[in-house]
Image (spheres, rainbow, N blue to C red):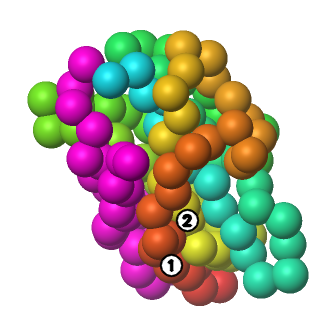
Amino acid sequence: QVQVAESGGGLVQTGGSLGLSCATSARTFTILTTAWFRQAPGKEREFVACIGWNGVSTDYGDSVKGRFTISRDRAKNAVYLEMNSLKPDDTAVYYCAVARTYRLPRKPDEYENWGQGTQVTVSP
């Protein structure tokens, strides 16, 4: 069982920036794609971004492409999400999730382990 924990959420104004971190208990040689999802009240869980086990391959949801950047530090078993040009529509609980795969899935049910989530609120 891989433990996953997010940190870094908070309140930011429109146009501002915020960084999220995801720490996992997995050993560095474990094949893990790590993703960020988000869920706003009354909405379905939405794919935000994911990064492959080697830290090179990435994929982004259309709503965040060009504004968010995902990165990985394999030595620290950590994945980061840098969020820029934030909008009120980015307000949600952000979840980190991991999958034992070489692929870059976008569907939540393809990820085996999830964190508890961290709240991001963007004020108008």
Mark 1 and mark 2: span between their CA atoms? 6 Å
Residue drawn 71% across and 69% down?
39
Q: Say whether residue 9 is magenta.
A: yes
The amino acid marked with disc number 1 is Gln
- Left or right: residue 75 compared with residue 34: left
Residue drawn 40% across and 20% down?
31
Residue 40 x, y percent position in the rendering = 73, 75
The residue carrying mark 1 is 119
The residue carrying mark 2 is 94
- Helix, strand or loop at label 2? It is strand
The amino acid marked with disc number 2 is Tyr
Q: Are marks 1 and 2 in contact (CB under 8 Å)?
A: yes
Residue drawn 55% across and 21% down?
101
Q: Quadrant of the C terminus?
A: bottom right
Q: Nearer the viewer, residue 84 or 57?
A: 57
Q: Say whether residue 61 is magenta.
A: no
Residue drawn 40% across and 73% down?
9
Q: Nearer the viewer, residue 2 or 60?
A: 2
Q: Nearer the viewer, residue 86 or 94?
A: 94
Q: Residues within 10 Å of mark 2 (few under 14, many from 20)?
A: many
Residues drawn in magenta: 1-29
- Helix, strand or loop at label 1? It is strand
Task: Quadrant for residue 65, please give it.
Answer: top right
- Left or right: residue 116 compared with residue 111: left
